Image (cartoon, rainbow, N blue to C red):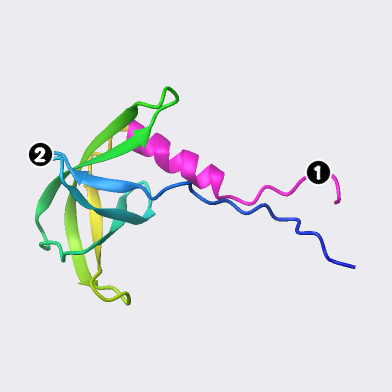
């Protein structure tokens, strides 16, 4: 008899792409995110100790993108295990409320919530 899965899998329907807020060009994708910072996966190494103006474009309920603008300082960068990719760690500078809300929404989305009744 097959065993039924009790833990629901969560997958994002897309990657969270990060843009340069000044040029509107893509910088890469979020590898992980916290209230204090994020890891960017990019085809380029980032300049360590440089400050970047960034933008997330989140799809809104009406289908129009919703922008979250923030600034962050690159703390480190290294080549990823995937050829042609780099991981860079960023510390946010005064993260806006919209960014902090996104972190909480993602944390809740990816948190295991056991059901009250057995399967």
Q: Residue at the location (33% across, 31% down)?
A: 97
Expressed as whole percent of the image width and height from the top left, the position of residue 6 reads: 76, 56
Residue 106 painted magenta = yes
Residue at mark 1:
116
Q: Is residue 33 magenta?
A: no
In the displayed structure, would residue 92 be above or below residue 50?
above
58 and 64: which one is in front?
A: 64
Residue 117, placed above or below residue 32? above
Residue 90 is drawn in which quadrant? bottom left
Question: Which region of the structure is painted magenta?
Answer: 98-119
Numbered circle sitting on residue 83: none
Q: Which mark is residue 22?
A: 2
Q: Is residue 110 left or right of residue 118?
A: left
Residue for point 37% across, 38% down: 100
Secondary element at image label 2: loop
**First-in-chain label (2 vs 1):** 2
Say which quadrant the N terminus sits in.
Answer: bottom right
Image side of residue 25 versus residue 87, left or right: left
Q: Position of residue 63 (x, y in %)?
A: 40, 27
Q: What percent of the width, then of the height, locates residue 34?
A: 38, 50
Alpha carbon separation for disc pair 2 and 1: 48 Å
- Please tell me whether mark 1 sits on a helix, a strand or a loop: loop
Q: Residues within 10 Å of mark 1 (few under 14, many from 20)?
A: few
């Amino acid at each position: 008899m097959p065993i039924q899965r009790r833990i629901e899998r969560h997958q994002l329907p897309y990657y969270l792409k990060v843009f340069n807020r000044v040029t509107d060009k893509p910088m890469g994708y979020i590898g992980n995110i916290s209230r204090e910072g994020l890891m960017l996966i990019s085809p380029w190494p980032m300049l360590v100790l440089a400050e970047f103006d960034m933008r997330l474009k989140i799809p809104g309920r009406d289908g129009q993108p919703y922008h979250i603008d923030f600034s962050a300082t690159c703390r480190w960068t290294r080549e990823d295990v995937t050829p042609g990719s780099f991981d860079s760690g960023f510390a946010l500078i005064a993260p806006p409320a919209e960014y902090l809300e996104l972190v909480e929404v993602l944390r809740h989305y990816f948190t295991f919530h056991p059901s009250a009744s057995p399967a």
